[in-house]
Image (cartoon, rainbow, N blue to C red):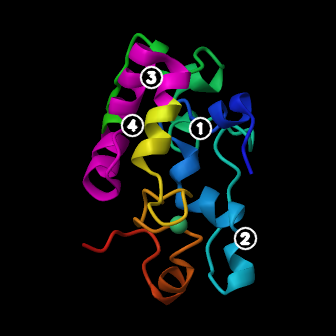
Amino acid sequence: MEMEKNERALLVAPCGMDCAICGAYLAGKHDVKSKGVRMPYCKGCRPRGKMCAFLKKRCPTLMQGGVEFCFECGSFPCGRLRTIDKRYRERYRTSLIGNSKLLRKIGMGAFLRKQEKEWRCAKCGGTICCHNGLCFACDIYELRKRKQKYRWRE
Ligand SMILES: [Zn+2]
């Protein structure tokens, strides 16, 4: 089922995280609880109305809705964003600052096309999760087996 374009764009969080590849988003999308996998569900940072899961409480600019994306901010990339970015680069093979810069440079449409290509499951055409490298459709048994749902296995 294809998602409307603006709906898909709402899955890109202010920090540059693409919620479409997040484990909690994919868990909900695939209703993994019904398949015996215990993971929290999330509709994405923007759709759930919290603006930003990582930064908002600690960022007055985001709290006040001063920017739509962190890259629009005079302090970009701030220390808070750099901290999260480091964790995501090291553990989850994605860079929030890199995404932000790319988004600023090439725009939402091109950014999303690149994301879809980069995180596309070769088996089913679905989405690979950045938190564990699994497709929640094809690899559901592997996901159920794993104790650590937020870790890649080399
Ligand atoms: Zn798949």
Give whichever of discs 3 and 1 has the lower sequence position. 1
**Compared to 33, does 105 lie above or below?**
above
Quickly name the residue at label 2: 31
Which span is picked out in magenta?
Answer: 83-111
- Residue located at (53% from left, 54% from top): 22
Pick whichever, 135 or 65, lies toward us. 135
**Which of the numbered marks, if any, corresponds to residue 28?**
none
Find numbered disc 3 in the image and state the secondary structure of the residue it sits on: helix
Tell me the distance, in whole angstroms, between the alpha carbons under discs 1 and 4.
13 Å
Which quadrant of the structure image shows residue 2?
top right
Q: Is residue 31 left or right of residue 22?
A: right
Quickly name the residue at label 4: 96
Tell me the distance, in whole angstroms, between the alpha carbons under discs 3 and 1.
17 Å
Give whichever of discs 3 and 2 has the lower sequence position. 2
Which marked residue is nearer to the observer: mark 3 or mark 1?
3
Quickly name the residue at label 1: 52
